[in-house]
Amino acid sequence: MMDDDIEKIRRKRAIKVLITDLFMATSVVGIVFVLVMAVAGWRINSNFEIEQNGLVSIKTHPAGATVFIDKKKEFQASNMSRMLPSGKHKIELEKDGYERWEKEIEITPGWLYRLEYPKLFKQNREKNTIRDFKTLSFLYVSPDRSTAILSEDDSTKWYVVSDFNSTPKFKEIDIMGIFSGTSDGSFTYKFNTIEWSKNNEKVLLNVIGEYKNDDGKTIAVDEWGLINLKDIKNSINLSDDYSRYEANSKAILASSKKTKTHTITSAKFENEAGDKIIAVVNNNLIRIDTDAKVISDNLAEKVKDFEIFDSTVIFSTIFEEGKSYIKLVRLGEKNQTIVAISSDINDKISFSLTKFNSMSYVLYTINNHLYVHRAKDFATGGGNKLNMKGIIDIDVGIIASEAVRSFNNEFIVLREGSRVIVFDAELEEWHEYDYGDETVRFLDNYLLYRVDEASGTFLTWDFDSTNVRTLVVDKGVNDFDALISPNDRFFYYISKEENGYSLIQEKLY
């Protein structure tokens, strides 16, 4: 064979190899491209048009529910995920022996819609009486639903209740002598405020009422107490001890001059252990260190009310010179950011902070106008402009008297009477409806509830007012907290019985 012929054969082979390599490379790139587009939700619809879908993740409690999407039964039961075209879709969940659940959702192209909270309540639930009480003064549940405090009568002997995931345990404590007028073992005061430390070992109480001293004189009581549920001997009367803490503090600012009276108007825990408290005292925002028994310099002045999230504080100022402000400040920093300005002394203001899905939210209302701002972090660098993106700016149907953040930080509830607005940080949308009660209460992270006083019927519904269901047909009591256990298996409530009250446990699944 001639050398020229051999060279031609080599060139042909090289060309074939090159073409093959190019084809394989193109195929791989094409397959990868298709896979990437598929993962991103791109599909060819029935009209042979390319569109981007979204993903819905459906998780139920309990699992194993039959899923219907737009009236069509899904092959896979919950828990499951499914690509759906953008737009509205109806989700229905069914399970034998359980109440039905449904919701209309809206899918956004390329986004995940997490529908991971639906609870399916068993229709015929096993009921157990945990404990009977001849009388019951109060029952308060911690935000994480793991702990409660209760009192059977008007005495200083209380119970700390725990282990709601199985069989609740009762531990007796005695708060005698912590508040004025309780040295005889009686406690007849009302709770004006109750705050729980994140580890549930302490509660911060503002109690109001009156008692008669040894001379028969009626003494008014408006005091703050820190109750150590783990070690009751380390509980303190914060109102009485404030002056001693101030005397221990050598670096008090000149603007925090000592006065004969120290009025604590609001207070919240700063840290998980509950040994540091942020409080408003004589309109000064200060830190109280209950371990070191000292107070800080003023964190802010002319403060009317405040809310705290981690180390960030949002507060409103007293009305002065024709203005009041809503401001942000980070603990340990002096710079304050103006969130909003009010120019009418009669304006009704409420506010809150939250973080969810790595985003920070500032929510506030001035009268019936709702504002929500969003950013990666709270803008506390100082200045007259809030450097956060406004996502809601709208008139609403209520003038809120308070703002309550859910334990999981996803929701902020605003209330006026029985009407509420629920802001959902997950979807950045709000829902307005009539709650039917003047107390905002969560049964778990997603369910709200109330008890109809006349019938004793216990009603619950999802945060957006959908899926209204009856949990208790009668004998429910509205005066006491109820809860679903942290493991979602048990429902606890107080029922009114012929000879008193009972703490009832119902097995949800």
Image (cartoon, rainbow, N blue to C red):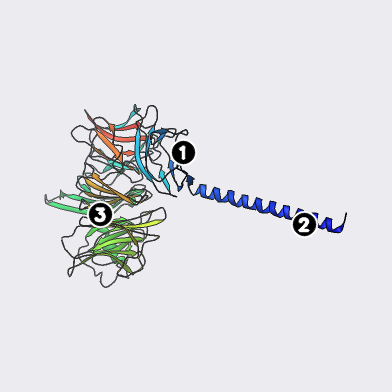
Task: Inspect the image, locate mark 1, and give the three-letter code of the amino acid beneath it.
Answer: Met
Decide which of tag 3 and tag 1 comes sooner along the chain.
1
Above or below for 391 versus 486: below
Looking at the rendered image, the quarter that the C terminus falls into is top left
Q: Which mark is residue 11?
A: 2
- What is the distance, in whole Å, between disc 3 and disc 2 at their CAs? 93 Å
Q: Amino acid at mark 3?
A: Trp
Q: Which mark is residue 80?
A: 1
> Tag 2, which secondary structure?
helix
Residue positioned 69% across, 53% down in the render: 19
Image location (x, y in percent) of residue 503: 29, 33
- Separation of marks 3 and 1 at Cα, in angstroms: 49 Å
Discs 3, 1 touching: Cβ within 8 Å: no
Dividing the picture into quadrants, the one containing residue 72 is top left
Residue 11 image-quadrant placement: bottom right
Q: Nearer the viewer, mark 3 or mark 1?
A: 1
